[in-house]
Image: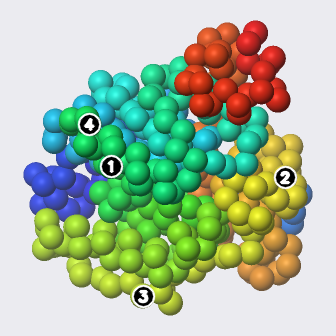
Amino acid sequence: MECVLFDKYPGLKKHIAWVPLGSFPTPVRRLAKLGEEIGCRNIWIKEDDKSSEYYGGNKVRKLEFILADALRKKKRTILTYGGLGTNHGLATTIHGKRLGLKTLLLLVDQPLTDHVQKNLLLCQHFGAQLCYVRNTIGAALNTIRHFLTKTALYYLPPGGSSPLGSLGFVAAALELKRQIDAGELPEPKYIFVALGSKGTMAGLLVGSRLAGLDSKIVGVRVAYTWLANERSTARLANKIISLLTGYDEAVPTIRFKEEDVSVLHDYCGKGYGFATSEGKEAMEILNTTESIRLDLTYTAKTFAAVLDLIKSGKIQGDAPILYWHTYNSVDFTRTIKQECDCRQLPKSFHRFFEANLIPYLQ
Ligand SMILES: Cc1ncc(COP(=O)(O)O)c(C=O)c1O
């Protein structure tokens, strides 16, 4: 199996490590039933939820580059970060384990939900070492401590959004271009995607330019503004370009400015991990019409933005719209019910189960 990025730029192959972890291309399809319901016939989905039978969602594409790099550098443990219910941490744990790598997760507070509890249980179940660090200061101090006391650690920024990890979404845009050329979907006028640690959007921005796509990439901010904004996304996109041009001069030197990045800021609600009522509605409508599951932290807010823009007439009725689905759809209900026990978690995590201990002890 070959990565589409190396097909386009073969010169990159000897410099950049890559390991196949997922099932690509992910499908694209028209959301016909939803379209009927909301009066918008040209709405499409890119189903990255189906990117892996082990654990899908947007992280798989990033991990194909990151974990390969860790292996090439002979690292044994990935040290990374997230909120208590981190999807990125879970994806890293599951896919890292497939390659014989351990994962050390430094976790900060986020609003406690059922989803957070489930992801904590799954991270423990799949063998992550969990370390509760409360906030970003705790994360910084614990990072220093671990790097001073452990060997063969691989540093992975939150969300897997290093320039290297973001190459997964450069490749994703090239993959989408092939699907458009093959007539599987029209070229989208808009592509909507959640904007958290930015690697997904920044990779798509770079990849769509390289692929010659005219689609406008629109990020729906779901994290705090200091982290997720136009300037920081442009900066990451430029770092991705520098990485690529440094290895292969066939890659054109493109520069992104803040003005080139479109971010919607009005759908985040109170902050990262806080559910919004519009998000809950979006979750409900997509589930009833298309049986697609959204999560409240990222994808429900993103889809709420899409629905709002359609309803308010801010995007034209006929323009093809692509919603990039980034949430995993592998169902772990049975694993959680039958194989997880919150008492196995380190003591510092027990408090997150006190209010709701019983369901997880069955
Ligand atoms: C389900 C889901 N969607 C979207 C994102 C955001 O992607 P990024 O962090 O690359 O901006 C994440 C990040 O963790 C995620 O878990």
Q: At x 74% / y 42%, what residue is drawn?
A: 112
Mark-to-mark CA distance, 4 and 1: 9 Å
Residue 98 visible (yes or no): yes
Label 1 lies in ligand 1 vicinity (Cβ under 8 Å): no
Residue 201 appears left or right of 350: left
For discs 1 and 2, the disc positioned in front in the rendered view: 1
Q: Earlier in the sequence, mark 2 or mark 4?
A: 4
> Judging from the image, what secondary structure is the residue with disc 2 in?
helix
Q: Earlier in the sequence, mark 3 or mark 1?
A: 1
Residue marked by disc 4: 149
Mark-to-mark CA distance, 4 and 3: 40 Å
- Tell me if mark 4 has few (under 14), some (14-19) or many (20+) residues whose alpha carbon lies within 10 angstroms of its own: few
For discs 2 and 4, the disc positioned in front in the rendered view: 4
x and y, in percent, of residue 107 in the image: 53, 43
Mark-to-mark CA distance, 2 and 4: 44 Å
Closer to the camera in the image, 16 or 48: 16
Residue marked by disc 1: 144
Q: Looking at the image, do the residues carrying marks 3 and 1 touch, with CB atoms under 8 Å apart?
A: no
Q: What amino acid is found at the position of numbered circle 2 in the picture?
A: Lys
Residue marked by disc 3: 257
Q: At x 13% / y 54%, what residue is drawn?
A: 15
> Judging from the image, what secondary structure is the residue with disc 1 in?
helix
